[in-house]
């Protein structure tokens, strides 16, 4: 892995770890059992992504707990439509970040990108749901 790819992958890895805590925090806070299930499934996927990226980078990173706490506060006070729309945009952005790395050198990137887009679609659909 060249230095440019490693730097990008470390950023991806940190983002995935932070997303795990964010989704876990949302699952802890929500009273909606459907949403809780979706958040926990997304957290599981993001954790798997972080583990894959760790194998590539050879680094062990820690999630930013303060960020998850702050996002939990926003989750409590913001309309869920806005939260879900923001999360969906972040997921699409993450998926787009993996696109340049899809290929033989990094075979898992395709599936990770697809997971990010899947999450984006799920949370975009929740943002459009009028029952929030």
Image (cartoon, rainbow, N blue to C red):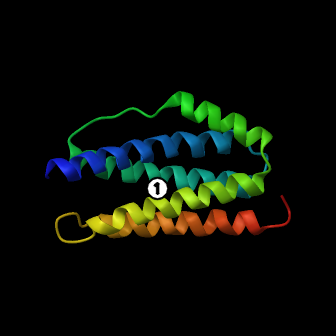
**Residue 126 point in image, percent of width and height:** 72, 64
What is the quadrant of residue 113 in the picture? bottom left
Q: Quadrant of residue 69?
A: top right
Q: x%, y% of residue 13? A: 36, 46
Q: Look at the image and tell me in which quarter the C terminus lies.
A: bottom right
| Occupied quadrant, residue 63 | top left
91 horizontally vs 129: left or right: left
Q: How many marks?
A: 1
Q: Which residue in the rendered view is the most extreme toward the right?
A: 131
The residue shown at (60%, 61%) is: 88
Please give the residue where the numbered disc 1 appears in the rendered image.
45
Q: Nearer the viewer, residue 46 or 87?
A: 87
Q: Nearer the viewer, residue 32 or 84?
A: 84
Q: Identify the residue shown where x is 63% and y is 57%.
A: 38
Q: Single out the residue that lies furthest toward the front.
A: 4
- Is 79 displayed left or right of 45 in the figure? right
Tell me: 46 left or right of 2.
right
On the image, the x and y values in percent for residue 84 come to 68, 56
Q: Residue at x 55, y 27 (%)?
A: 66
x and y, in percent, of residue 103 in the image = 22, 72
């Amino acid at each position: 892995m060249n230095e440019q790819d490693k730097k990008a992958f470390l950023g991806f890895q940190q983002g995935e770890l932070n997303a795990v805590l964010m989704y876990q925090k949302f699952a802890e806070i929500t009273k909606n059992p459907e949403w809780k299930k979706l958040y926990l499934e997304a957290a599981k996927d993001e954790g798997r992504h972080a583990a894959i990226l760790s194998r590539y980078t050879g680094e062990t990173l820690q999630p930013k707990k303060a960020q998850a706490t702050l996002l939990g506060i926003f989750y409590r006070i913001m309309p869920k439509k806005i939260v879900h729309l923001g999360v969906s945009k972040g997921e699409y952005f993450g998926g787009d970040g993996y696109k340049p790395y899809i290929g033989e050198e990094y075979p898992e990137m395709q599936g990770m990108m697809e997971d990010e887009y899947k999450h984006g679609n799920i949370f975009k659909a929740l943002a459009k749901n009028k029952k929030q």
